[in-house]
Amino acid sequence: MPYLRRPRGLTQRLGHLVIRGLMASPTRLGRALPTGRGGWHDDGVDWLLAQVNIARMLAPLDSPQLADFVAALDPVNAAADAAPGFVWRLQTEDGNATAVQAFEWDRAGRAGVLVNMSVWESVEALAAYVYSDTHRQVLKRRRQWFERMADAYAALWWIPAGHTPTTAEAEGRVLHLRECGPTPYAFTLREHFPPPGVANFGPTRSPQDWTCPA
């Protein structure tokens, strides 16, 4: 899953992680997106790409089983923050990620669900990071830490620049993707759509070299 920040103690907020049972004030759900920045332009609207992905943990985050995963968070998070096309990620006003209750319906009977949400300038920018060497090294070991999911666990959608995506919005996109498959409303890196207003609004299959071997 994309970049995450190392936790500072069991009750601290994590980079892009949302730890079940922790709450944050709705007024501190993250800095607003900067205006006037977009990767696509149509009729005066700048469009950006929002993404969310979730992971079901096999053990608590503070367990020995997830120790290597926690240790990898700082370098992976730093690589994402420095990646070309990165715009925004879910975090508090003081720079910490927000630990909120979201995707509660996906948690039942599990050690916890980690949630990551961010915004990028384009599908290509997000893919370049996700399939980079730094991120692949973590992906290759994900089965040691997270449950294999048959349902869709990552969703992408277009937002107008200046709009800040919410966890409720992200939940709706994931549910729609699970029910309907990739559509302009919610899609994936493997099969994605251009932003509203683009003449060719049909789905686009990702290049073969975007396929992650991990």
Image (tube, rainbow, N blue to C red):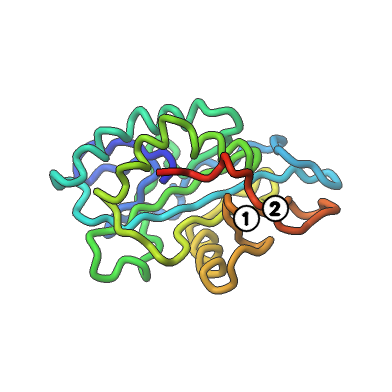
Which residue is depicted at the point 66% across and 44% down?
A: 48
Query: For residue 91, which quarter of the picture?
Result: top left
- Look at mark 1 in the image and give the residue it sits on: 191
Percent from the top left, x then y, of residue 112? 27, 58
The amino acid sitting under disc 2 is Thr
Which residue sits furthest left?
64
Classed neighbour count for the residue bearing mark 2: other residues with Cα under 10 Å, few (<14), some (14–19), many (≥20)? few
The residue that appears at 48% across and 32% down in the rendered structure is 132
Q: Which residue is denoted by mark 2 in the rendering?
A: 204
Give the mark count.
2
Depth order, front residue of 97/177:
177
Q: Quadrant of residue 187?
A: bottom right
- At which x and y percent is residue 92? 42, 41
x then y, percent, for residue 156: 58, 53
Most extreme residue toward the bottom is 179
Residue 134 badge:
none
- CB atoms at circles 1 and 2 under 8 Å apart? yes
For the C terminus, the image quarter is: top left
Question: Which type of secondary structure does the marked residue at label 1 adopt?
Answer: strand
**Vertical comparison of 119 with 174: above or below:** above
In the figure, is residue 125 to the left or right of 78?
right
> Distance between the Cα atoms at labels 1 and 2?
6 Å
Q: Is residue 203 above or below residue 123?
A: below
* Residue 166 image point, x, y percent: 52, 55
